[in-house]
Amino acid sequence: MENTVQKRTVLVVEDNEMNREILCDLLEDDYHVLQAENGLVGLEQLDAHCDELSLIMLDVYMPECDGFEFLQRKQADPRFDTVPVIMMTASNTVDDEIRCLELGASDFITKPYNVEVMKNRMKSTIRLRESASMLGRLELDSLTGLYSKEFFYHNVEEVLRANPDTSYDIVCSDVENFRSMNDRYGQAWCDSFLRSLAGTISGNLPDMLMGGRIGADIFGFLLRHQPDSVLKAALTPGEDDPGGRKFVVKHGIYADVDHTLPGSSLCDRATMALGKIKRKFNSDVAWYDDEMRKSQQQEQQIVENMQASLEKREFQVYYQPKHDLHSDRTGGAEALVRWIHPELGFISPGVFIPLFERNGFITKLDFYIWEEVCQEIRRCIDAGIPAVPVSINVSRMDFEVPDLAEQIAALADRYGVDHGLLHIEVTESFYVENPEQIAATLEQLHANGFYIELDDFGAGYSSLTSLNTLRLDVMKLDMSLIRQAAATQDYSILRFAVLLADGMRLKTVVEGVETEDQVAALKVLGCDYIQGYFYSRPLPRADFEEYLSVHAVR
């Protein structure tokens, strides 16, 4: 019995039932084994047992949620950082192995298993992670004398557990632009500065019980609950260093903390408040509030519902027509996603899209939209409705799919959709982050007959280098340009953008057009297409088809 209790827990995520049972039989003498038949069930098991798991054995290719998506979603939740993953696959593809390792996998084994090799790799991975964990649990931070992160979290939880009726606050303090300070002043000065700062904050906070260094330049403090005015006074900005060096420290506060939450979650709430004032002049202290709590709850609800909503087709594609100024008819449209949940109601794209980009779900949603658009174009053709080109926004993460161009081409061919009817919208920020990969993928898409649109030109970052390097067909001018021009009656910037596009043989689309005067001005400038509320709002599928029947070029 004693031996069973000491067994480490391993989670096996494998969709093939026979393979899963064989693997579990091989491991059950040495480990307590949990099973999951796909990635979604595996994520549920991880959520329920993350504190006891020593290792995850994860299959790469599975239905519903494959190994790549599992790793992306695991990586998005810091609670799971300490659980290592060994990938299992029958494929010897180097690209798969590289992608898995980039997404946080610890090792990679191929099927059929060499049992001894597999067991030794498992032991080595577990031993390495446990050794790292023990090092991380050293009680005191050698530089500042505060608790180390793990001990701070642990001791906070002990205090809260022992004093359920006492109110406490968590304060998290962060040095802005610390990396550039390190580069500029050197490590020795920065170490001395952090040591001094830790002592200063500790000394200024009233009823401070303990402090911890929870990041390279982030401190956490536990203190008995204080009035807001007292904390604000205690956390006033520091003066310049005697050597003339300037520094800025921001503080986030989670007041009257929830005693049931782990220490890491308490600090997460304080740092969430801190994030509100980063890089904001004259804002040094912020409190975690009910609005943040609701936002956090909403994000959790979105994550819990996203996969089921996709399967139930609760994400709907709306189409905003593009008006052709030369023919005075509808000459295209942009596909825009809307999420109308039966219980949560309308969820703004401004809320769920950034979250999906962080957790990796955006790639799955984008391919869903591609298929919806292909189906709609096919439906129009079959019904005798004029089919117009439809542009679709793609995420930066989509370009991490190795065969993106081939997959989109295969999808269009499945529905018999001419590739020229599908336009791909990209922003310049993608190109800045990974220029070689983006340029190569766009070249492949262009070679496959897809049109490439540069979205949001003039929205803040516009590079002539990217214009000259990327294979483009259309330049979309951001709505801020037409609004500024209409407000000042100065269309010189728009005129320059149109002349630039014309010189590069690019069609132009102006977004956000709302008035007849704007339309008249854009006609004079020689713009090709207009998109905005003057002609139409984004329309659901049935209304869009009716609109095309009346307004489209035949």
Image (spheres, rainbow, N blue to C red):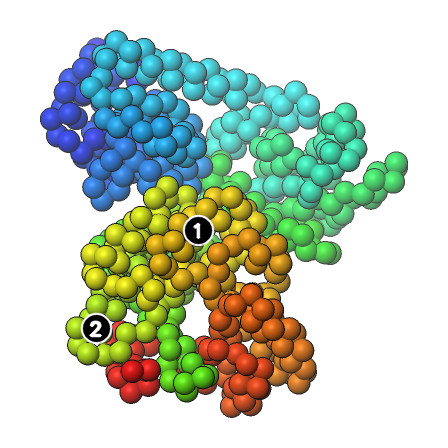
> Residue 192: x and y, percent?
77, 28
Side (left or right) of 323 relative to 523: left
Q: Amino acid at mark 2?
A: Ile
When asked about the image quadrant of residue 170, the answer is top right
Considering only vertical position in the picture, is 151 above or below 497? above
Q: Which mark is residue 381?
A: 2
Asked if 273 appears above or below 47 in the picture, the reply is below
**Residue 436, x across and y down, in percent:** 51, 44
Say whether residue 125 is visible: yes
In the image, is 33 to the left or to the right of 317? left
Residue 428: name its quadrant: bottom right
* Residue for point 28% across, 56% down: 368
Q: Secondary structure at mark 1?
A: helix
Q: Residue at x 33, y 41 (%)?
A: 69
Secondary structure beneath disc 2?
A: helix
Quarter of the picture holding the C terminus = bottom left
In front: label 2 or label 1: 1
- The residue type indicated by label 1 comes to Glu
Residue under label 1: 443
What's the residue at 75%, 48% (across, down)?
A: 236
Relative image position of residue 220 (x, y in whole percent): 60, 36
